[in-house]
Image: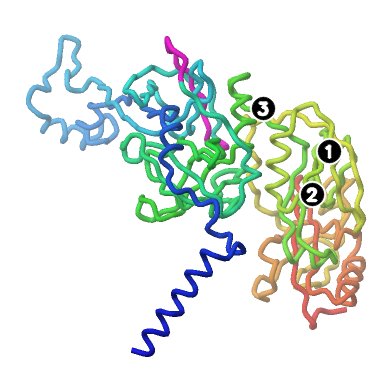
Amino acid sequence: MMKISKKLSGAIIVLFYMVASPSLTFAQGTPGSFADLAEELKPAVVNVYTTQNIRVDRNRRRGGGFPPGSPFEDFFKRFSPPGAENDDEGESRNSRPRVQQRRSLGSGFIIAAEGIIVTNNHVIDDADEISIKLQDGTELEAELIGKDDKVDLAVLKVESDEPLPFVKFGDDTKSRVGDWVLAIGNPFGQEGSVTAGIISAKNRNINSGPYDRYIQTDAAINRGNSGGPMFNMNGEVIGINTAIFSQSGGNIGIGFAVPSTQAQVIIEQLREFGRTKRGRIGVRITEVSDEIAESLGLDNSNGALVNSVEEDSPSERAGVEFGDIIVEFDGAEVKEMRDLTSTVANTEIGSTVDMVVLRDGKRKTLRITIDELDESSDEDAEETGDDGEGSSETETVLDLTLAEIDDEARERLDIDEDINGVLITAVDYGSGREGLRRLRRGDVIVEVTQRDVSSIEDVKERVEAQKNAGRSVVLLSIFRRGEYAHVPVKLDEEDDD
């Protein structure tokens, strides 16, 4: 009994301290109920119904899917169902293509009284008909104003005799991890469902596209919630619910929403132009890994490393160089490569901003004017390297067989006269050295730790300088078939001088 009473006494003291102490603020701001907020917001949240017409070739089914004239096709036709006789034109009535309808359901929300609705692109993509259903049961046909598959957003328009209830966007950047959020949508067709949770994380990259900056939440989000709004406690939309992480297809407390500040830029462009207009600066970039940062003697791995600069691009005109590390853009710090990608994409086309690069360890500010990104052209596919055998005298450095570039190599490998460096003729992948897997025969090493090299001796000197500086990684900048890349390669104590 004495032990039990001690525990009980301790529990009473703790509870009293929680109530009496003003320093325990974790319970403050917790809503007693979400009812008033939900009642106010629900009328602006809608069901989005879509129908897609799919043509089914019955004749293909009767032939078993075999090519015309195949003996197997004839075999399957012998066992056609009754009533498959030919019509006057010699075509089986059952063989005529028929149309199946595929239906889908999602969520959306009204952002203007005249009937402007936001939802996800994947909710309406490839739809032949789009309809929305209001909370009071009214159904209206919707017109697609514009869509963006990179950030998975779409804007619809409906006509209504009366002004429609709508909600406003808030600033997601003012929300913090741990803040309460409310999600409203139609999970599994259950209309007007309200769930609550907190912001679990921000700026999440789930590898769904090049501009991932998702808000993560533990508010229950399921199929049918797609396109629905995420509200803060002021009733402002700070996110558009888009995806879940789940192995079962149901909610496990990991949902993702497009941030409002990112969405608003796209929505405004879709309303004005019917498509997205993204900015570009004309560079190919890569992450600054910890290995690259160490090889260059940097304090951290912030920034985006320039692989190449396009001709006659904003970056070339601004003076950006191969090997620069972009660390700041328009006043915003670039912590990761995707920070730069998203910021540039959302920057007004034609505007001129400051961009800060690290070059030879020093900060340099450049003025750059933004062009429009042509999203109709795809990125070039990675190409295989060429064989570098038959070049001049070779030497092994970092488990790479290197050779000087002679005229024969330039002609065989199509290396322009203005490309100077050292040719890789063989790679010892069996050595186990980290980084070699990204190198190939035919690659040209043009820089080592951001210093030009034109001979094997230059490479060896730069490697030795890295070792003397106490670094364990060396950064090789290579040229391959018209493209540049940066590859960190591990050093070890046994490397030859």
**What whole-number distance in Å separates the C-alpha atoms at marks 1 and 2?**
10 Å
Q: Which numbered disc flags the more N-terminal residue, 3 or 1?
A: 3
What residue is rendered at 57% in x and 43% in y?
A: 209
Quarter of the image that includes the C terminus: bottom right
* Relative depth, front residue between 98 and 403: 98
Quarter of the image that includes the N terminus: bottom left
Specify whether 129 is left or right of 216.
left
Query: Is most of the magenta stretch helix, strand or loop?
Result: loop
Q: Which numbered disc flags the more N-terminal residue, 2 or 3?
A: 3
Q: Is residue 161 magenta?
A: yes
**What whole-number distance in Å separates the C-alpha atoms at marks 2 and 3?**
23 Å
SS of the residue under disc 2: strand
What residue is rendered at 38% in x and 84% in y?
A: 5
> In front of the other: label 2 or label 3?
3
Question: Where is residue 72 drawn, in percent x and y?
Answer: 21, 37
Q: Are marks 1 and 2 in contact (CB under 8 Å)?
A: yes
- Segment tinted magenta in the rendering: 150-164
What residue is rendered at 42% in x and 85% in y?
A: 6
Q: Is residue 149 above or below residue 301?
A: above
What residue is rendered at 22% in x and 36% in y?
A: 64
Specify whether 58 is left or right of 457.
left
> In front of the other: label 3 or label 1?
3
The residue beneath circle 2 is: 306
SS of the residue under disc 3: loop
Q: Residues within 10 Å of mark 1 (few under 14, many from 20)?
A: many
The residue beneath circle 3 is: 277
Question: Where is residue 117 drawn, in percent x and y?
Answer: 49, 24
The residue beneath circle 1 is: 315
Q: Is residue 216 above or below residue 489?
A: above
SS of the residue under disc 1: helix
Amino acid carrying mark 2 in the image:
Val
